[in-house]
Amino acid sequence: MPVKEGKMFIRALFDYDPKEDKAIPCKEAGLAFRKGDILQIMSQDDATWWQAKHEGDANPRAGLIPSKHFQERRFALRRPEVQIQPLKISNRKSSGFRRSFRLSRKDKKTNKSMYECKKSDQYDTADIPTYEEVAKYRRQPNDKYRLVVLVGPVGVGLNELKRKLLISDTQHYGVTVPHTTRPRRSQESDGVEYIFISKHLFETDVQNNKFIEYGEYKNNYYGTSLDSVRSVLAKNKVCLLDVQPHTVKHLRTYEFKPFVIFIKPPSLDRLRETRKNAKIISSKDDKGTAKPFTEEDFQEMIKSAHVMESQYGHLFDKVIVNDDLATAYSELKTTFDRLETETFWVPVSWLH
Ligand code: 5GP
């Protein structure tokens, strides 16, 4: 069924320029947009070309954009490993995304920062980001806080920003307590540094999809559970979670309504300037000792940020460049304030 005219809003998850599109019937009739733009759908009568305009645009004239299914097919053709079903229906409301959340079984590798989230065996349209249907959401006083997910490359300063936020108001912000199977050390308390559990229980919990991520380090498991996020939110605190970006799509549920902030490095020149006296804990260093940044660390950070942004940028609600720490922190703080009071576009499925 076609949607009622003008009642549907979508978030574009890719950049589109009709001038570059060989398939569009008339380039002048096309509507250009950028990843993250909110578009108002005016007509879905045609299976291949929808009519849309930018949200809030007073100009009543709509432009052509590729329909979701048409664009998915085009993207899939560029990625032969993705199987896509033939075009069957001409008009599709909503996204038809299927959520999959499966953690992999035990991995033999011992990498302490290894995060294990396996892709579903079956085709998942969420792997081909085109559009997602959105609606406006404003947090009500009795609503739980939205989960705040921080992502960014190693060394970008994400932990420092998180630490500053936490100490700014320990009653308001909280972090998860990870699980581990290693023995408790004398100065540690269960439920403070870690939740200590047996290997058997950890493996059972992995099988039951209770972990957002987990890794193995020196023959012990470490991981962050969904319940640990729930317990922070239940205390009426804002939960700050930093994860690898590939886990974000599994957290995008009605329950968590995550707000994803990408902490991005500045240019290479600015990295050299601003981090010349700073230190990094290298992922290759088993002992976790901090060392001065090397040129290789800077280049790796920029490369990794670029990969994260191109693969997962459509899941980021906000990008903060950590050039100068104080400025990045103040931008982060303002974002949190806005999050609690202002209206945001979220997937429609989060509102039902
Ligand atoms: P330790 O046993 O010295 O407390 O921690 C060893 C390592 O375990 C840490 O350096 C950290 O990389 C890793 N670790 C701690 N918590 C987690 C977690 O929640 N998930 C994963 N994947 N690794 C963790």
Image (tube, helix red, strand yellow):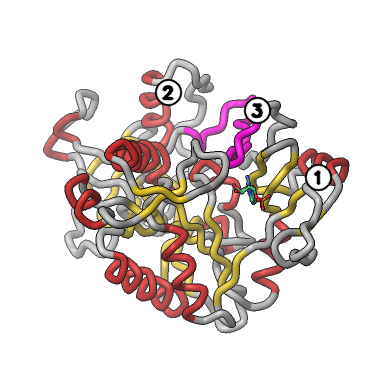
Residue 81 drawn at (x, y percent) = 49, 17
Q: Residue furthest left?
A: 28
Residue at (79, 47) in percent of width and height: 181
In-image side of 208 versus 7 (left or right): right
Residue at (46, 48) in percent of width and height: 281
Q: Residue furthest top?
A: 80
Q: Secondary structure at mark 2?
A: helix
* Mark 3 surroundings within 10 Å by alpha-carbon count, few (fewer than 14), some (14 through 19), many (20 or more): few
Residue 121 drawn at (x, y percent) = 64, 25
Residue 76 circle label: 2
Give the Cα separation between the discs numbered 2 and 1.
37 Å
Q: Is residue 50 magenta?
A: no
Q: Amino acid at mark 1?
A: Phe
Residue 109 circle label: 3
* Pointer 1 residue: 202
Q: Secondary structure at mark 1?
A: helix
Q: Amino acid at mark 2?
A: Ala
The answer to which quarter of the image holds residue 21 is: top left
Q: Amino acid at mark 3?
A: Lys
Residue at (67, 39) in percent of width and height: 217
Task: Tell me where the magenta segment starts and ends, as one range.
Answer: 109-127
Q: Is residue 110 magenta?
A: yes
In-image side of 64 versus 153 (left or right): left
Please determine whether, in this image, residue 317 is positioned above or below residue 80.
Answer: below
